[in-house]
Image (cartoon, helix red, strand yellow):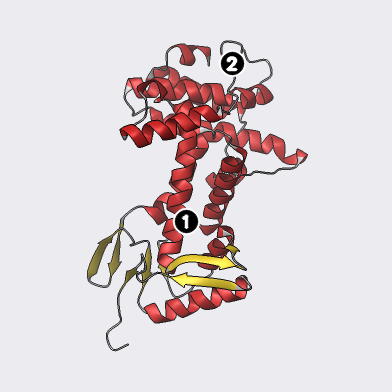
Amino acid sequence: MINTHRKPSAENLKVLILYLNSIASGKLSLSCIRQNIFKTRWSESEKSLRTRCHILAAALYLETLLSTPSGQREANAKTVIADALPHVRKLSPSADTSFVLGSTNTLPSTIHYKHAEWLFNHDDLPTEEKNRYGLDILVLYALRLSLEKRILGFLGIDFIEVNGKPCSFSKLIKVAKNLINVQYDKSIKWDEIAWVNAWLNHHMHRHLRPYPWVIYQAFEILNPLLLPSTLVDGKTTHHSFYASTFVTDEDSFHNEVEHGISKAIQNAQIVWKPRTEILKRKVPGA
């Protein structure tokens, strides 16, 4: 690790990746890795598996850095190494990790405030603050905003309240998961989206700086739902921001959403959007 931290070349990075995989003792499925790295609570018996999953996820993220420019690779690799040290020490107590201080995963509130102030006044961030360690927490807020907007958008909801208070967004994810009058992109995994949402809420409310490799997996999970894509409907190919959610009968879909919410959330008061963020096509003759 020390050689890679001093010189994060592609070759040294490959050596580090092999090392991380070796101390994690074997392969685990991607689903298992994701489930454990997004956990916000765990039992004593789960700690070892969770540590292994974080190391394997870090190795997966480092693999993506192999194709990035050297300057970007260097900064990101050094941050990953600092973040990974606590997990490395648990799996390999004899490893020399004294060459760099571990990450505290926290930042003073003034730093967050200055980021907001500078971004508003200059449409940019101060040059000296453009680093992985200082900016990753801002990614959380953007991810949470985009996820909520996308799900509310295709459900056709402007906002929803329960007894005058905002409805739990996690309940809406459960409603979306069970809908049958919508065709979802086959790569969408609602259980994993729920993990990401819980992890985002936990880190935002606790003001924790996230590990880069967990952010990377969050993007991998959300990409099928959030990114523009293509859907083939018979002989027609649709290119759309919303191709990951497709309906042929909008009225049936709307009724199902309304019924699903009333069943899952008592006293829900829904304000509907005039337009839904969903790809739709009326079946001829319907």
Residue under label 2: 101
Q: Which of 71 and 106 is in front in this view?
A: 106
Q: How crowded is mark 2: few (under 14 residues within 10 Å), some or many (20 or more)?
A: few
Give the residue drawn at x 59%, y 66%.
164
Give the residue drawn at x 38%, y 77%.
250
Residue 133, horizontal then vertical, whole percent: 48, 26
Q: Which residue lies furthest to the right in this view?
A: 44
Q: In this view, does 35 lie above or below 268?
A: above
Residue 3, horizontal then vertical, whole percent: 48, 12
Q: Is residue 63 above or below residue 241?
A: above
Examine the image and state in which quarter residue 171 appears: bottom right
Identify which amino acid the numbered label 1 is placed on.
Glu
Does any portion of residue 110 appear in the rendered image?
A: yes
What separation in Å lies between label 1 and label 2 (alpha carbons)? 36 Å
Using residue 31 as the reference point, say whether residue 245 is left or right of it: left
Examine the image and state in which quarter residue 224 appears: bottom left
Residue 166, horizontal then vertical, whole percent: 57, 61
Residue under label 1: 148
Does any portion of residue 14 appear in the rendered image?
A: no
Q: Residues within 10 Å of mark 1 (few under 14, many from 20)?
A: some
> Which dot, 1 or 2, sits closer to the camera?
1
Q: Which of 9 and 104 is in front in this view?
A: 104
Identify which amino acid the numbered label 2 is placed on.
Leu
Q: Is residue 79 above or below residue 191?
A: above
Give the residue drawn at x 50%, y 57%.
189
